[in-house]
Image (cartoon, grey):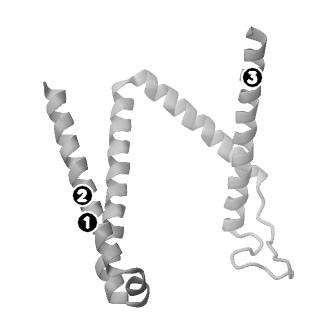
């Protein structure tokens, strides 16, 4: 009985949020493309509320997701151990990627140093880390894919 009430409440809340979004979108469409592009006051009056509404919905969804995920983790200690182990492995892989990256100078086609691309820049180092981290995770994923494919071929 309790789940049915919660389901109805959630349905009403989602319907209300959808109606608010539709109303805000209709206001933007009624203002017209030219008015929104050319008049800052009109854009602030009709576009800003839609943007803020969307932004707050995103924050709310992320917050609820984090709270429910963390709540589920703390209720199940075995799951918490697995999650912490996985995060530890990802942290080690990140440290490996960081050690492989460099912070060399970044030049464009005309041999001009790009803004933020100076030698020793932390931006260069973290971009390189992200690239190496993606490559490492991609190769691990590819390895598991090939392993699973081979396992499936052997079974059939």
Between marks 1 and 2, how big is the CA–CA gap? 6 Å
Q: Determine contact: label 1, label 2, CB under 8 Å.
A: yes
Q: Which mark is residue 19?
A: 2
Q: Nearer the viewer, residue 126 or 111?
A: 111
In the displayed structure, 92 sits above or below 21; it is above
Q: Position of residue 129 (x, y in %)?
A: 70, 54
Secondary structure beneath label 1? helix
Q: Secondary structure at mark 2?
A: helix
Find residue 4 and report its horizontal and vertical position in percent.
Answer: 17, 29
Q: Which mark is residue 23?
A: 1
Task: Give the numbered dot on residue 96.
Answer: none
Say which residue appears at 32% left-offset and 61% top-offset: 56
Is the residue marked by circle 3 packed among few (<14), some (14-19), or many (20+) residues within 10 Å?
few
Query: For the residues carrying marks 2 and 3, which lies nearer the camera in this image?
Result: 2
Asked if residue 111 lies left or right of residue 148, the reply is right
Q: Which x, y percent locates residue 154? A: 78, 11
Q: Residue at x 85, y 78 (%)?
A: 109
Foreground residue, 73 or 92?
73
Mark 3 or 1: in front is 1
Do labels 3 and 1 touch, CB within 8 Å? Answer: no
Residue 66 picture quarter: top left
Q: Quadrant of residue 153?
A: top right
In this figure, which residue is indicated by the disc labeled 3? 149
Residue 79 versus residue 11 in the image, above or below: above
Whichever of callouts 3 and 1 sits on the residue coming sooner in the sequence is: 1
Quadrant for the N terminus, please. top left
The residue that appears at 29% across and 61% down in the rendered structure is 21
Q: Is residue 126 above or below residue 24?
A: above
Crowdedness near tag 2: few (<14), some (14–19) or many (≥20) residues, C-alpha within 10 Å:
few
Gap in angstroms between the C-alphas marked 3 and 1: 50 Å
Alpha carbon separation for disc pair 2 and 3: 47 Å
Count every numbered label the image shows and give the total: 3
């Amino acid at each position: 009985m309790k789940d049915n009430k919660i389901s109805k409440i959630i349905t009403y809340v989602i319907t209300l949020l959808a109606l608010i979004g539709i109303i805000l979108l209709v206001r933007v469409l009624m203002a017209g493309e030219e008015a929104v592009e050319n008049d800052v006051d009109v854009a602030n009056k009709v576009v800003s509320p839609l943007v803020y509404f969307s932004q707050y919905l995103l924050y709310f969804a992320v917050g609820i997701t984090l709270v429910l995920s963390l709540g589920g983790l703390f209720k199940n200690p075995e799951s918490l151990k697995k999650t912490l182990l996985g995060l530890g492995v990802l942290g080690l892989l990140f440290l490996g990627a960081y050690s492989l990256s460099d912070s060399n100078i970044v030049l464009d086609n005309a041999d001009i140093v790009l803004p933020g691309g100076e030698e020793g820049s932390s931006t260069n180092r973290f971009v390189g880390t992200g690239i190496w981290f993606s490559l490492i995770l991609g190769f691990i994923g590819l390895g598991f894919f090939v392993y699973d494919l081979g396992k499936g071929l052997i079974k059939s």
